[in-house]
Amino acid sequence: MEKNVENRDQWGSRLGFILAAVGSAVGLGNIWRFPYMVYENGGGAFLLPYFFAVLTAGIPMLVLEMGLGHKMRGSAPLAFRKIKEKYETLGWWAVLVTAVVTVYYSVIVAWAVNYMVFAVKQSWGADPNAFFFKDYLGATGFWDFGSIKTNVLLGLAVVWGITYVILYNGIKEGIEKASKIFMPLLIVLLGVMVVRGVTLPGAIEGLNHFLEPDFSVLKDYNVWVSAYGQVFFTLSLGFGIMIAYSSYLPKKSDVVNNAFITAFANCGFSFLSGFAVFGILGYMAQAQGVPINEVASGGIGLAFIVFPKAINLLPGMNSFFGILFFMSLVVAGLSSIISLVEAFTSSIMDKFKMTRKKAVTVVSLGGFLCTIVFATGLGISILDLVDHFLNNYGLAVVGLAECIILGYLWKLTTVKEHVNQVSDFKVGNWWDISIKYITSIVLGYMLIMKVKTELT
Ligand code: PFF
Ligand code: NA
């Protein structure tokens, strides 16, 4: 390995970096957001705007963030500061967004940890809906601070404990090693779920509804905007994560190729999840004698209400598949949390010249304490607020500012020259066009529409 002049931590291998980047990208967004989004937005026809967004925004922005982190050798605030002092603020905005997603993510993964245990005996009983809202979260009222939910608290302790241990051990010994376990494990888990899903009676029906194309949606620009939004979220763009992760790459690293591999691997996981989820939903609809649209769902509803119902209905090995499903949420979620907390941690390390061990301890402890409030009856209401903030202002602001600063106020060619110098696969004019025009316009439009709906 080449000499590391600034004494910055470094990935041990290219594979390690890629697995970590894929680990960040692959998360709840792939498992519970993508399948339902496809289903709702024209089925197979949605793949057209989706791939268009991957090619014109996803990959170009990945190259941009990875190139920037690699060139500047710093997390988001430092990387932007090196462009111009006042841009540092943008980096901190990214860090703030990161902190918010982390809170959201860690609560959900804590729930998934709990549900993995519940799956053993299907403790959610015959009515998972009532179980989730009453028995499990048990909010007696909006301001119900009083009742701390021990299970949730334990789940949070597990999530933050694992994150702490992994990050404490650093890039190579911590994140890289964990990713080398998590990612293969996730492939196996999802692989088993897909095989189980598509071989169930009624699965074909589910998959038909998942992928049956309705090309008329292509006329609706909201569908295109949704595709761009999903691509940003799914590739962890606009959070400063890819900037931080790439700042630990060795000097000679094929940035462009890494970006392509990360994007395509992430798409692969999304498809796998789609087949598993809709295969099982198809079976569920058939078993209950209801149309697919009565069971099709995404997000919290899918994971903690619909899936427990589906697990109850499986023709055998219910506990096994139940555990597997929630374990895949946990593994996918944890590897994303690790990247989120690392982006936060490395920003603090860069800014305050803190040691990793100290920064990780402060951040993990703080994070854990901040999330405890979610173990109260208030949890789910705050989660909605967080979700709202995120989807509306989070990534779009950072993404747009990145495009404007790098595309217009600074020389985009600086990053381009850098990535083309270190990569075998070189980016051409499509890259500049994507960032300066396509992505900027779509994000700008997204933001304006959000603000508009907010004001009306
Ligand atoms: N990319 C993750 C997903 O698709 O679930 C979400 C995410 C993880 C976004 C980590 C941002 C991030 F930093
Ligand atoms: Na993703």
Image (cartoon, rainbow, N blue to C red):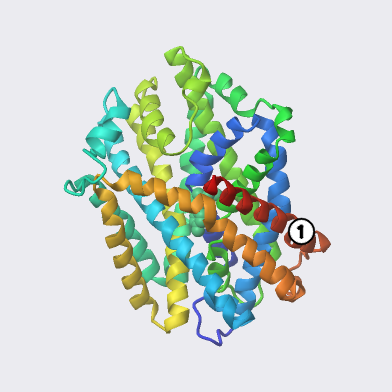
Give the quadrant of residue 211: top right
Give the quadrant of residue 111: top left
Q: Residue at x 58, y 60 (%)?
A: 397
Residue at which label 1 appears: 437
Position of residue 48 measured from the top left corner of the image (x, y, whole percent): 72, 39
Is the distance from the Cβ of mark 1 to the nearest ligand 1 atom less than 8 Å? no
Give the quadrant of residue 38: top right
- Alpha-carbon neighbours of circle 1 within 10 Å: few (<14), some, or many (≥20)? some
Closest to the observer: 180 or 286?
286
Closest to the observer: 363 or 116?
363
Quarter occupied by the N terminus: bottom right
85 left or right of 426 in image: left
Q: Residue at x 64, y 80 (%)?
A: 83
**Residue 113 against residue 85 in the figure, above or below:** above
Residue furthest to the top in view is 289
111 left or right of 207 in image: left
30 left or right of 288 in image: right
164 left or right of 45 in image: left
Q: Is residue 1 visible?
A: no
Closest to the observer: 261 or 333?
333
Residue type highlighted by circle 1 = Tyr
Q: Residue at x 55, y 57 (%)?
A: 395
* Numbered-mark total: 1
Q: Residue at x 47, y 74 (%)?
A: 347
Closest to the observer: 225 or 192?
225
Position of residue 308 measured from the top left corner of the image (x, y, whole percent): 36, 30
SS assignment at label 1: helix
